[in-house]
Image (cartoon, rainbow, N blue to C red):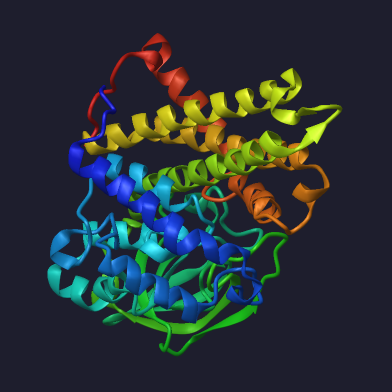
Amino acid sequence: MDFTLSPDIEKLRRKTRDFIASEVLPLESRPEIYDEFENIRLDRLDELRAKAKAAGLWAPQMPTSRGGLGLSVVGWAALYEEANRSIFGPATLNCAAPDDGNMTVLNKVLSDEQKDKWLQPIIDGRLRSSFVMTEPAPGSGSDPGGMMLTRAERKNDRYVVRGRKWFISGAALARHFILIARTSDDPRRGLSAFLYHGDDPGWRIVRRIDIMGPQEHGGVCELEFDGLEIPMEHRLLEEGDGLKFTQLRLGPARLTHCMRWLGLAKRCLEIAQAHVGERKAFGATLATRESVQMMLGDVAKDIQVGCLLTMNAAWRLDQGDKAQSDISMAKIHVADTLHKAADTSIQLLGAKGYSKDTVLDWIYRYARAARLIDGASEVHRMLIARALAKEGIDFWKWGRDVQG
């Protein structure tokens, strides 16, 4: 496993770093750039996106035939990390959640004709999308197959949807939605996946849920379905393939979170290093203090471990492996590392770190969600333990069998 980047990807990585440094980072310190939800205003984002397209850095995960860069998963890792050196970077390059995961899975399962209608507008940045699965208790959370209550009942040539969903990312601005709903009580094949458009009648946004951290564009919302009709041709895969579809989407999406979080973790250390290199106490800069060096070195070590876990899982995905345990290990570690990097950096900056003079407070509040989204860390530990019980000592073998 050689993780040396190809010359083409390395060139794109450096180009991304330079673009983020010159075009995106300077905007973070300008209060007028932010909207009421602590994200970049959409009009200013559109300006940045036009620059990213002109620079040839648009949609790294999408095929070149559809306007993307056509990179491998390893290529995503290299560019996403550089993009999220800025809190605005992934949205600028069109590799931010939830659109990123939605585009990836739709590109896998749709026909060319369907891609023209449902996928291409997202790739072009003309509209946004949302993935609709999580429900209020007692509905589905980490166990959608066993607990999902939203039902899609088949009537002639369409499905009629009734139920409730919540914490649906990006829903307030999305126009294309991917919905997971129950179509039977079969324990393994009871769920199905569908597409619907924001203008379709029979559903509504109940509320945009207020959260402790800064919000992505479109926030997280609670939705109600009261007779939404979905034509049969807007079903994704076969009836009963809902769990299969969620696995196709969530595995790579969890890993792309890790790629972006590593960029934010590195940014935290960058801010901390700049501060301790200048700030003096008791006759010397903080950077010369052994205690400070130990704090920075510990986080740097954890970031490097996260990079290796993420690249390893990315490489396995490129080889055709599902890489489920590898992704879970990366997800747990990188989520913890992001929080640790932000917390350590705030500690080193002191009162300045606790203020809004840097983006550390933004990242710190954002980081707390990392241990919850796309499966809580405890669930991923459970999945790893199950794989360990099944594989025994071979859990640690060099290389995994390709599972298709």
**Residue ID at (74%, 59%):** 356
Whether residue 243 is visible here, answered yes or no, is: no
Is 292 drawn above or below residue 123 in the view shown? Answer: above
Whether residue 336 is visible here, answered yes or no, is: yes
Most extreme residue toward the right is 282
Q: In terms of depth relative to the viewer, which is nearer, 254 or 10?
A: 10
Which corner quadrant holds the C terminus?
A: top left
Q: Is residue 54 left or right of 219 when viewed as pictured?
A: left
**Residue ID at (65%, 78%):** 207
Tell me where residue 29 sits by quadrant: bottom right
**Residue ID at (48%, 77%):** 44
**Residue ID at (65%, 55%):** 359
Most extreme residue toward the front is 283
Question: Residue 262, percent across and down?
Answer: 50, 41
Question: Residue 154, percent across and down?
Answer: 35, 75
Most extreme residue toward the top is 393
Tell me where residue 348 sits by quadrant: top right
Q: In terms of depth relative to the viewer, which is nearer, 274 or 42?
A: 274
Count of numbered tags: 0
Q: In terms of depth relative to the viewer, which is nearer, 132 or 50?
A: 50
Which corner quadrant holds the N terminus?
A: top left
Q: Is residue 220 left or right of 111 when viewed as pictured?
A: right
Tell me where residue 267 sits by quadrant: top right
Is 27 drawn above or below residue 224 in the view shown? Answer: above
Question: Residue 28, percent across and down?
Answer: 58, 63
Q: Is residue 400 left or right of 210 when viewed as pictured?
A: left
Q: In terms of depth relative to the viewer, which is nearer, 6 or 382?
A: 6
